Amino acid sequence: MSGLRSLFRPAEQATYEKVFGTVYVGLMTNVLLAVACAPLLAALAIVRDPAASWPFFVALSALCAPALAGAFSCFAALGDGSTAVFRTFWDGYRRGGARALALWAAGAVVVSVLALDAVVVARTAWGPALVPFFATAAALVVAVVVASLVLLAEPRREPPRLRDLVRPSLYLVARRWWLAAISLAVLVLAVAVILVKPVIGVLVLCSPLLYVAWATIRFIVAPALGKP
């Protein structure tokens, strides 16, 4: 009987506050991501075949870089017990925006070149054997860019240099590649949901999926943050 009483005993107020705070941060982060990436979302809604205009969308996707820096800042603050979304998001957006854009632009160029090379090489007789190499290299680039954005979103007194973000990210992602693969799978799922169901993807599922990817990547780069 005492076991049943403890099972159905109401949770403490702090538990409810934490749950509602987490839900609030997730929902508001979704809204802010939608606002920050509104031009990209509008273009995806207007253009019938985005693949035919991929250079335009690759360039427009740069809007996601500072938005992700802001979202990752909110996740980091939530881990420290803060539920201040607007100020945290825009502080992360403004503080890391330029570096996030540089990281994203460099990654987009490298991934585009790898994709074009894969298409060209795949048409040759021996090309299919090299396609996995190009795919793996592109995945590594994406993982390093995301890991660098996670490091960039961490609260710091001074903004880090790009090489101080990329070098540890490259080493740690390659070291724990299986966790990076999980994060990439979650990010691909988030993009797929947004493309298929834009409203549900952006306003409901985007933040939870990004949080899973962020938490996994943050565990990967923990040594660079001075954590075991």
Image (cartoon, rainbow, N blue to C red):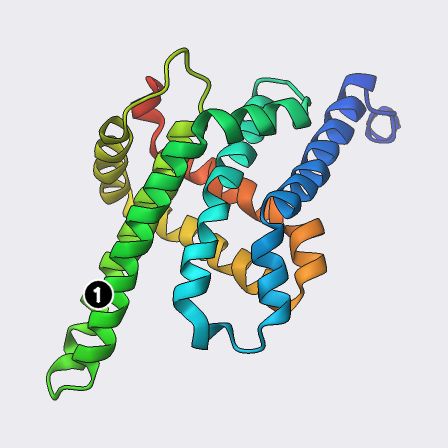
Where in the figure is residue 24, as x and y percent of width and height?
74, 33
Residue at 63% across, 70% down: 46
**Quadrant of res 224:** top left
In the image, 180 versus 121, the foreground residue is 121
Quarter placement of the C terminus: top left
- Residue that sits furthest to the bottom in the current view: 125
**Quadrant of res 139:** bottom left
Say if 211 sits above or below 127 in the image: above
The residue under label 1 is: 134
Residue at 28% across, 25% down: 161
Q: Is residue 9 left or right of residue 23?
A: right
Count neighbours of disc 1 (C-alpha within 10 A) and say few if under 14, some if 14 to 19, many if 20 or more.
some
In the image, 119 versus 183, the foreground residue is 119
Amino acid found under the numbered disc labelled 1? Phe
Q: Secondary structure at mark 1?
A: helix
Where in the figure is residue 48, as x and y percent of width and height?
58, 77
